[in-house]
Amino acid sequence: MNILQYLIPKKEVAYVLDSFSVRQTLEKMEFHHYSNIPILNVDGKYIGAISEGDILWFWKNNNLSFNKLNGKNIMEINHNRIIHSIKIDATLNELTKLIINQNFVPVVDDRNIFIGIITRKAVMKELTKNIMKKELEIVVATNNMHKIKEYEEMFKPYNIKITYPKALGINIDPVEDGLTYEDNSLIKAKAIQKYTSLPIIADDSGLNIEALNNFPGIYSSRFADSKGGNKTANKEIIKMLTPYKNKNAFFTCVITLLNLEKEPLQFKGICPGYILDKPEGENGFGYDPIFFSKEANGCFGTIDEEIKNKYSHRSKAFTQLIDYLKEKNFID
Protein backbone atom coordinates (compact mmCIF):
# COMPACT_ATOMS: atom_id res chain seq x y z
CA MET A 1 0.00 0.00 0.00
CA ASN A 2 1.38 3.42 -0.97
CA ILE A 3 1.92 5.62 2.09
CA LEU A 4 1.53 8.75 -0.05
CA GLN A 5 -2.24 8.33 0.15
CA TYR A 6 -1.94 9.73 3.70
CA LEU A 7 0.42 12.59 2.79
CA ILE A 8 -0.33 16.21 3.63
CA PRO A 9 1.87 18.01 1.07
CA LYS A 10 4.43 20.63 2.02
CA LYS A 11 2.34 23.52 0.66
CA GLU A 12 -0.38 22.67 3.22
CA VAL A 13 1.99 22.19 6.16
CA ALA A 14 3.29 24.82 8.59
CA TYR A 15 7.05 24.55 9.03
CA VAL A 16 9.92 26.77 10.17
CA LEU A 17 13.44 27.39 8.89
CA ASP A 18 16.53 26.78 11.00
CA SER A 19 17.16 30.53 10.99
CA PHE A 20 13.91 31.28 12.85
CA SER A 21 13.87 32.69 16.36
CA VAL A 22 11.80 31.20 19.16
CA ARG A 23 9.33 34.10 18.80
CA GLN A 24 8.84 33.45 15.08
CA THR A 25 8.42 29.74 15.78
CA LEU A 26 5.82 30.27 18.50
CA GLU A 27 3.91 32.73 16.32
CA LYS A 28 3.78 30.20 13.49
CA MET A 29 2.60 27.47 15.86
CA GLU A 30 -0.09 29.72 17.31
CA PHE A 31 -1.31 30.88 13.89
CA HIS A 32 -1.60 27.35 12.54
CA HIS A 33 -2.72 25.74 15.84
CA TYR A 34 0.28 23.36 15.73
CA SER A 35 1.93 21.94 18.85
CA ASN A 36 4.68 20.30 16.76
CA ILE A 37 6.39 21.73 13.71
CA PRO A 38 9.07 20.50 11.24
CA ILE A 39 12.35 22.41 10.85
CA LEU A 40 13.94 22.80 7.41
CA ASN A 41 17.16 24.39 6.24
CA VAL A 42 17.38 26.91 3.41
CA ASP A 43 17.73 24.07 0.89
CA GLY A 44 14.39 22.59 1.96
CA LYS A 45 15.95 19.61 3.70
CA TYR A 46 14.35 18.22 6.82
CA ILE A 47 16.64 18.57 9.83
CA GLY A 48 14.33 18.03 12.80
CA ALA A 49 11.19 19.13 14.56
CA ILE A 50 10.27 21.24 17.55
CA SER A 51 7.29 21.37 19.86
CA GLU A 52 5.90 23.84 22.36
CA GLY A 53 6.95 21.33 25.01
CA ASP A 54 10.56 21.48 23.78
CA ILE A 55 10.57 25.26 24.11
CA LEU A 56 8.92 25.16 27.54
CA TRP A 57 11.42 22.56 28.81
CA PHE A 58 14.39 24.62 27.56
CA TRP A 59 12.96 27.81 29.11
CA LYS A 60 12.40 26.29 32.55
CA ASN A 61 15.67 24.37 32.72
CA ASN A 62 17.78 27.36 31.71
CA ASN A 63 16.03 29.93 33.93
CA LEU A 64 15.68 32.40 31.07
CA SER A 65 13.51 35.48 31.02
CA PHE A 66 10.81 35.45 28.35
CA ASN A 67 12.62 38.18 26.37
CA LYS A 68 15.88 36.24 26.44
CA LEU A 69 14.06 33.09 25.38
CA ASN A 70 12.52 34.87 22.41
CA GLY A 71 15.95 36.09 21.41
CA LYS A 72 17.17 32.52 20.98
CA ASN A 73 17.43 30.76 17.63
CA ILE A 74 15.38 27.53 17.63
CA MET A 75 18.49 25.49 16.79
CA GLU A 76 19.95 26.48 20.17
CA ILE A 77 17.21 24.58 21.95
CA ASN A 78 18.04 21.13 23.27
CA HIS A 79 15.13 19.05 21.97
CA ASN A 80 13.63 16.46 24.28
CA ARG A 81 12.38 14.34 21.41
CA ILE A 82 13.49 13.34 17.95
CA ILE A 83 10.88 13.26 15.20
CA HIS A 84 12.08 10.63 12.74
CA SER A 85 11.39 11.13 9.05
CA ILE A 86 10.51 8.49 6.48
CA LYS A 87 11.28 8.03 2.77
CA ILE A 88 8.51 8.34 0.20
CA ASP A 89 8.94 4.69 -0.85
CA ALA A 90 8.60 3.33 2.71
CA THR A 91 6.07 0.60 3.46
CA LEU A 92 2.94 0.97 5.54
CA ASN A 93 4.51 -1.35 8.12
CA GLU A 94 7.55 0.97 8.46
CA LEU A 95 5.26 3.98 8.75
CA THR A 96 3.13 2.30 11.43
CA LYS A 97 6.17 1.56 13.60
CA LEU A 98 7.14 5.24 13.58
CA ILE A 99 3.68 6.74 13.93
CA ILE A 100 2.97 4.89 17.19
CA ASN A 101 5.48 7.10 19.02
CA GLN A 102 5.07 10.34 17.04
CA ASN A 103 2.15 12.69 16.38
CA PHE A 104 3.33 13.00 12.80
CA VAL A 105 6.01 11.64 10.50
CA PRO A 106 7.86 13.98 8.11
CA VAL A 107 8.18 12.50 4.61
CA VAL A 108 11.35 13.15 2.59
CA ASP A 109 12.72 12.17 -0.80
CA ASP A 110 16.06 10.46 -1.49
CA ARG A 111 17.92 13.77 -1.00
CA ASN A 112 16.18 14.37 2.33
CA ILE A 113 14.09 17.17 0.81
CA PHE A 114 10.94 17.66 2.87
CA ILE A 115 7.75 16.95 0.88
CA GLY A 116 5.11 16.82 3.61
CA ILE A 117 3.86 15.02 6.69
CA ILE A 118 1.68 12.06 7.61
CA THR A 119 -0.33 12.38 10.82
CA ARG A 120 -0.92 9.64 13.34
CA LYS A 121 -4.66 10.31 13.17
CA ALA A 122 -4.83 9.54 9.43
CA VAL A 123 -2.89 6.28 9.72
CA MET A 124 -4.69 5.01 12.83
CA LYS A 125 -8.06 5.70 11.22
CA GLU A 126 -7.12 3.52 8.25
CA LEU A 127 -5.66 0.77 10.44
CA THR A 128 -8.76 0.72 12.64
CA LYS A 129 -11.00 0.52 9.58
CA ASN A 130 -9.03 -2.47 8.26
CA ILE A 131 -9.15 -4.24 11.62
CA MET A 132 -12.90 -3.73 11.90
CA LYS A 133 -13.50 -4.85 8.32
CA LYS A 134 -13.55 -8.61 8.71
CA GLU A 135 -14.18 -11.07 5.92
CA LEU A 136 -17.84 -10.87 4.96
CA GLU A 137 -19.61 -14.24 4.85
CA ILE A 138 -22.77 -14.49 2.77
CA VAL A 139 -25.25 -17.32 2.34
CA VAL A 140 -26.35 -17.83 -1.26
CA ALA A 141 -29.88 -19.17 -0.99
CA THR A 142 -29.56 -21.96 -3.54
CA ASN A 143 -28.26 -25.50 -3.73
CA ASN A 144 -27.86 -25.24 -7.51
CA MET A 145 -24.13 -25.90 -7.89
CA HIS A 146 -24.04 -24.12 -11.28
CA LYS A 147 -25.28 -20.92 -9.61
CA ILE A 148 -22.95 -21.37 -6.64
CA LYS A 149 -19.97 -21.76 -8.98
CA GLU A 150 -21.02 -18.63 -10.88
CA TYR A 151 -21.26 -16.64 -7.64
CA GLU A 152 -17.87 -17.97 -6.46
CA GLU A 153 -16.28 -16.66 -9.65
CA MET A 154 -17.92 -13.26 -9.30
CA PHE A 155 -17.04 -12.92 -5.59
CA LYS A 156 -13.38 -13.88 -6.14
CA PRO A 157 -11.95 -10.33 -6.25
CA TYR A 158 -13.59 -9.37 -2.94
CA ASN A 159 -13.06 -10.25 0.71
CA ILE A 160 -16.26 -12.30 0.74
CA LYS A 161 -16.74 -15.94 1.66
CA ILE A 162 -19.87 -17.63 0.35
CA THR A 163 -21.72 -20.65 1.66
CA TYR A 164 -25.04 -22.26 0.82
CA PRO A 165 -27.95 -23.89 2.69
CA LYS A 166 -26.86 -27.55 2.50
CA ALA A 167 -23.39 -26.62 3.74
CA LEU A 168 -25.09 -25.12 6.81
CA GLY A 169 -27.35 -28.11 7.32
CA ILE A 170 -30.40 -26.22 6.07
CA ASN A 171 -32.73 -28.34 3.96
CA ILE A 172 -35.63 -26.31 2.68
CA ASP A 173 -37.38 -25.93 -0.66
CA PRO A 174 -39.71 -22.93 -0.49
CA VAL A 175 -42.75 -22.66 -2.73
CA GLU A 176 -42.07 -19.88 -5.25
CA ASP A 177 -45.62 -18.63 -5.68
CA GLY A 178 -44.82 -14.96 -6.30
CA LEU A 179 -46.00 -13.10 -9.39
CA THR A 180 -42.69 -11.38 -10.14
CA TYR A 181 -38.95 -12.05 -9.97
CA GLU A 182 -38.83 -9.67 -7.01
CA ASP A 183 -41.48 -11.70 -5.16
CA ASN A 184 -39.81 -15.06 -5.70
CA SER A 185 -36.33 -13.78 -4.88
CA LEU A 186 -37.62 -12.44 -1.57
CA ILE A 187 -39.47 -15.70 -0.82
CA LYS A 188 -36.22 -17.68 -1.21
CA ALA A 189 -34.22 -15.31 1.00
CA LYS A 190 -36.85 -15.21 3.75
CA ALA A 191 -37.07 -19.02 3.81
CA ILE A 192 -33.35 -19.14 4.79
CA GLN A 193 -33.57 -16.15 7.14
CA LYS A 194 -35.27 -18.30 9.79
CA TYR A 195 -32.13 -20.41 10.15
CA THR A 196 -29.18 -17.98 10.00
CA SER A 197 -28.16 -14.51 11.06
CA LEU A 198 -25.59 -14.31 8.25
CA PRO A 199 -26.28 -11.97 5.32
CA ILE A 200 -28.31 -13.78 2.66
CA ILE A 201 -28.58 -13.29 -1.07
CA ALA A 202 -31.20 -15.02 -3.15
CA ASP A 203 -31.92 -14.54 -6.81
CA ASP A 204 -34.74 -15.35 -9.11
CA SER A 205 -34.09 -15.38 -12.81
CA GLY A 206 -35.68 -16.44 -16.04
CA LEU A 207 -35.87 -16.23 -19.79
CA ASN A 208 -38.41 -13.84 -21.29
CA ILE A 209 -39.37 -14.29 -24.96
CA GLU A 210 -41.16 -11.37 -26.60
CA ALA A 211 -43.19 -13.40 -29.15
CA LEU A 212 -44.46 -15.67 -26.35
CA ASN A 213 -45.63 -12.81 -24.10
CA ASN A 214 -42.43 -13.14 -22.05
CA PHE A 215 -42.97 -16.86 -21.45
CA PRO A 216 -41.49 -18.81 -19.70
CA GLY A 217 -40.47 -15.86 -17.46
CA ILE A 218 -40.79 -16.59 -13.74
CA TYR A 219 -41.82 -20.13 -14.69
CA SER A 220 -38.54 -20.83 -16.52
CA SER A 221 -37.29 -23.41 -14.03
CA ARG A 222 -40.65 -25.10 -13.64
CA PHE A 223 -41.14 -25.27 -17.42
CA ALA A 224 -37.77 -27.01 -17.80
CA ASP A 225 -38.63 -29.45 -15.00
CA SER A 226 -41.97 -30.23 -16.65
CA LYS A 227 -40.10 -31.19 -19.83
CA GLY A 228 -37.65 -33.44 -18.01
CA GLY A 229 -34.76 -30.97 -18.14
CA ASN A 230 -33.36 -28.10 -20.14
CA LYS A 231 -32.27 -30.08 -23.19
CA THR A 232 -35.86 -30.99 -23.97
CA ALA A 233 -37.14 -27.58 -22.82
CA ASN A 234 -34.72 -25.81 -25.17
CA LYS A 235 -35.95 -27.84 -28.14
CA GLU A 236 -39.54 -27.09 -27.14
CA ILE A 237 -38.82 -23.34 -26.99
CA ILE A 238 -37.32 -23.41 -30.49
CA LYS A 239 -40.38 -25.34 -31.74
CA MET A 240 -42.79 -22.85 -30.11
CA LEU A 241 -41.02 -19.96 -31.88
CA THR A 242 -41.18 -21.56 -35.35
CA PRO A 243 -44.20 -19.47 -36.49
CA TYR A 244 -42.62 -16.18 -35.36
CA LYS A 245 -40.02 -13.95 -37.02
CA ASN A 246 -39.42 -12.09 -33.79
CA LYS A 247 -36.88 -14.15 -31.84
CA ASN A 248 -36.00 -11.38 -29.36
CA ALA A 249 -35.60 -12.45 -25.74
CA PHE A 250 -33.95 -11.30 -22.54
CA PHE A 251 -32.78 -12.87 -19.34
CA THR A 252 -33.83 -11.20 -16.08
CA CYS A 253 -32.29 -11.59 -12.63
CA VAL A 254 -33.33 -10.02 -9.33
CA ILE A 255 -31.04 -10.44 -6.30
CA THR A 256 -32.45 -9.90 -2.81
CA LEU A 257 -30.13 -9.05 0.10
CA LEU A 258 -31.31 -9.80 3.66
CA ASN A 259 -29.82 -9.61 7.17
CA LEU A 260 -27.50 -6.70 6.40
CA GLU A 261 -29.91 -3.79 6.66
CA LYS A 262 -33.29 -3.48 8.40
CA GLU A 263 -35.19 -3.77 5.13
CA PRO A 264 -34.61 -6.14 2.18
CA LEU A 265 -32.64 -4.68 -0.72
CA GLN A 266 -33.10 -5.77 -4.35
CA PHE A 267 -30.91 -5.42 -7.43
CA LYS A 268 -32.07 -6.13 -10.99
CA GLY A 269 -30.14 -7.06 -14.11
CA ILE A 270 -31.33 -7.62 -17.69
CA CYS A 271 -29.42 -9.23 -20.56
CA PRO A 272 -30.87 -8.67 -24.07
CA GLY A 273 -30.52 -11.13 -26.94
CA TYR A 274 -32.46 -13.56 -29.11
CA ILE A 275 -33.28 -17.25 -29.42
CA LEU A 276 -31.20 -19.35 -31.82
CA ASP A 277 -32.66 -21.87 -34.27
CA LYS A 278 -30.70 -24.67 -32.61
CA PRO A 279 -28.73 -25.19 -29.39
CA GLU A 280 -25.01 -24.38 -29.46
CA GLY A 281 -22.15 -25.38 -27.19
CA GLU A 282 -21.81 -27.13 -23.86
CA ASN A 283 -20.93 -24.15 -21.65
CA GLY A 284 -23.25 -22.49 -19.19
CA PHE A 285 -26.47 -24.16 -18.07
CA GLY A 286 -30.23 -23.90 -18.38
CA TYR A 287 -31.32 -21.97 -21.46
CA ASP A 288 -27.79 -20.75 -22.25
CA PRO A 289 -27.30 -22.98 -25.37
CA ILE A 290 -30.24 -21.36 -27.20
CA PHE A 291 -29.61 -17.76 -26.11
CA PHE A 292 -27.44 -15.36 -28.15
CA SER A 293 -26.34 -12.31 -26.14
CA LYS A 294 -26.30 -9.10 -28.17
CA GLU A 295 -23.85 -7.45 -25.77
CA ALA A 296 -21.43 -10.38 -25.59
CA ASN A 297 -21.94 -11.06 -29.32
CA GLY A 298 -22.08 -14.76 -28.70
CA CYS A 299 -24.16 -17.68 -27.53
CA PHE A 300 -24.05 -18.25 -23.77
CA GLY A 301 -23.53 -21.93 -24.54
CA THR A 302 -20.24 -21.29 -26.35
CA ILE A 303 -18.60 -18.17 -24.86
CA ASP A 304 -16.10 -18.32 -22.01
CA GLU A 305 -17.40 -18.11 -18.44
CA GLU A 306 -15.41 -14.89 -17.92
CA ILE A 307 -17.14 -13.18 -20.84
CA LYS A 308 -20.55 -14.45 -19.78
CA ASN A 309 -19.99 -13.13 -16.25
CA LYS A 310 -19.34 -9.70 -17.72
CA TYR A 311 -22.65 -9.44 -19.58
CA SER A 312 -25.06 -11.84 -17.91
CA HIS A 313 -28.23 -10.71 -16.17
CA ARG A 314 -26.94 -12.17 -12.90
CA SER A 315 -23.65 -10.33 -13.30
CA LYS A 316 -25.43 -7.01 -13.81
CA ALA A 317 -27.56 -7.46 -10.70
CA PHE A 318 -24.44 -8.65 -8.86
CA THR A 319 -22.50 -5.52 -9.90
CA GLN A 320 -25.22 -3.36 -8.34
CA LEU A 321 -24.96 -5.46 -5.16
CA ILE A 322 -21.17 -5.02 -5.03
CA ASP A 323 -21.49 -1.27 -5.64
CA TYR A 324 -23.86 -1.09 -2.68
CA LEU A 325 -21.53 -3.09 -0.39
CA LYS A 326 -18.66 -0.77 -1.36
CA GLU A 327 -20.71 2.38 -0.84
CA LYS A 328 -21.65 1.21 2.66
CA ASN A 329 -18.03 0.17 3.41
CA PHE A 330 -18.83 -3.52 3.92
CA ILE A 331 -16.07 -4.30 1.39
CA ASP A 332 -13.25 -2.41 -0.35
Image (spheres, grey):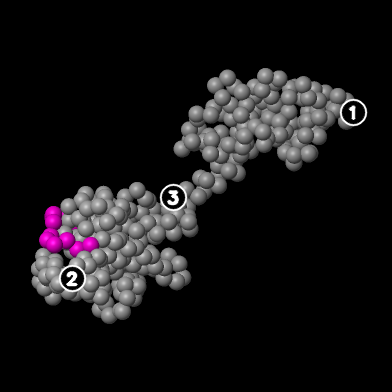
Which quarter of the figure has residue 121?
top right
Amino acid type at circle 3 is Asp
For marks 3 and 1 on the same chain, the one whose residue lies earlier in the sequence = 1
Start and end of the magenta stretch? Answer: 274-284
Q: Which residue is mark 1?
A: 67
Q: Which residue is mark 2?
A: 244
Packing grade of label 2 (10 A; few <14, some 14-19, many >=20) is: few
For marks 2 and 3 on the same chain, the one whose residue lies earlier in the sequence = 2
Question: What's the CA distance linking mark 3 and mark 1?
Answer: 55 Å
Element marked by disc 3: loop
Question: How many callouts does the rendering have?
Answer: 3
Amino acid type at circle 2 is Tyr
Which residue of the protein is positioned furthest toward the front in this rendering? 245
- Between 2 and 244, which is closer to the camera in this rendering? 244
- Between 79 and 211, which is closer to the camera in this rendering? 211
Res 82 visible = yes
Q: Is residue 145 left or right of residue 278?
A: right
Q: Is residue 165 above or below residue 63?
A: below
Q: Which residue is mark 3?
A: 332
Rendered location of residue 213, percent (x, y): 25, 75
- Between 259 and 209, which is closer to the camera in this rendering? 209
Asked if residue 312 is among those painted magenta in the image, a careful observer would answer no
Disc 3 vs disc 1: which is toward the camera? 3
Element marked by disc 2: loop
Asked if residue 279 is among those painted magenta in the image, a careful observer would answer yes
Q: Is residue 178 left or right of residue 119?
A: left
Rendered location of residue 209, percent (x, y): 24, 69
Rendered location of residue 118, percent (x, y): 59, 36
- Between 307 and 14, which is closer to the camera in this rendering? 307
Rendered location of residue 88, percent (x, y): 53, 29
Residue at 56% x, 33% y: name it: 98
